[in-house]
Image: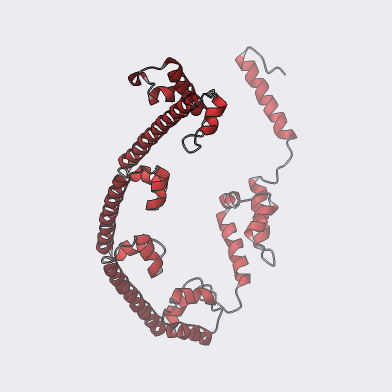
Amino acid sequence: MSFLEPDLARATTSWHEAQVRIQKARLPSTRSRDNIKAELQRAASEQPPPRLSDVARHLNYVKLDRPYRVDAKLCRRIASNYQKTLQPPGIKAWDKRFRSPQQMQRALEESLQQDNPRSPYHVSIDLGFVGDEPLRRKFPTLCRAIQAKIDNYNASRIEAMGRALAAALIEDPPPSLTEMCSRLGYCRPVVLRGHSSELCDQLVERRRVHRVREIEKLRSELHQFSLDVPAISLEHACRRVGFSRQQLLRLCPEECAAIVAHHDRESRETAQRKVQELYSEACQIVARLHAEGKLPSVKRINALLGRDLSRSWSERAAAIRAAKAELSSAPPDSARPSPKDLGAGSR
């Protein structure tokens, strides 16, 4: 037998012959259609009736799709036989009375006595029913009374919701819809909008106007900070207004930039003024030491300089060098080095 025969007719003959040999050598499968149907017929007459899922698991199936495709009627018969074993004798499938009529009536009466009664459906679920049809069929008057009381309770809650929203409109600051949900005991604002959409829109608009007004007040306060003397940093401004840096930058970017620029400008001016004072003090010390006939050394001048002027050694050294250079060259006052040059020298 050759599978790589160049002649198509001979190759086809070889493939058919191989297929026949494979079919004869194949073992019978337990998942064949005949075997599945035989297993279903055996389960349909078995006592006690098995579950259909157990039959499918016995055939190595996880789901019930394949057994239903083989024979749907047998599958439904197996499922029905098993369901009948779960029902007490003499009880119809559509009327599963797990409780006595007295118990059902007592449960409905207890629900009716509550301020916020439980619906007949939830009472039925507590009693073991799938739906509320058995209770509504046997006790229609009680079920209607419970439903009427539930409707009245819901109407009173909706009326109270409207009053609360109307009162919130005159609050200052106006609360958010989420806060109103917390007050009234609702989970989400969509519940408020479902019953009082106009009041909710008015509350949202008042809150928006209030927010705009508060932002304008914040901007005015920050603008005043940008003019204060001495200047304050942006972090200090954040602590005074009670907002974080990110919030201020998002709400008032221009005012924040003005505060930072004002603070930087005053910091530079203060540093320049200290350099000038340090230079003047160094010149006076050098002149005094020279008049006393003492050598104006760096160590001696540095010891006489005040610590309040500057603690930076580079600035103090630059001021001492400039003062000694002025004494040695005795330049006119107009040629005295400027504080800006001293600052550059210190750097």
Q: Nearer the viewer, residue 328 or 59?
A: 328
User: How far from the left and from the top, in percent, is residue 163?
Assistant: 28, 72
Q: Nearer the viewer, residue 5 or 131?
A: 131
User: How far from the left and from the top, in percent, is residue 133?
Assistant: 44, 75
Task: Please identify the residue farthest to the front as the structure is shown.
Answer: 292
Q: Is residue 347 visible?
A: no
Figure check: 72 above or below 312: below
User: How far from the left and from the top, in percent, is residue 273?
Assistant: 39, 33
Q: Looking at the rendering, which quadrant does residue 339 occupy?
A: top left
User: How far from the left and from the top, in percent, is residue 179?
Assistant: 38, 63
Q: Left or right: where does residue 156 sit relative to residue 236?
A: left
The residue at 62%/66% (across/down) is: 82
The residue at 55%/23% (across/down) is: 297
Figure check: 294 above or below 74: above
Way the structure is coloured: secondary structure
Q: Left or right: where does residue 38 sit relative to residue 149?
A: right
The residue at 38%/47% (across/down) is: 237
Q: Quadrant of the N terminus?
A: top right
Count of number-bearing discs: 0
Q: Is residue 166 visible?
A: yes
Figure check: 129 above or below 34: below
Figure check: 320 above or below 121: above
Task: Please identify the residue farthest to the top as the structure is shown.
Answer: 6
Q: Left or right: where does residue 148 sit relative to residue 37?
A: left
Q: Left or right: where does residue 326 sit relative to residue 21?
A: left
The residue at 55%/81% (across/down) is: 99
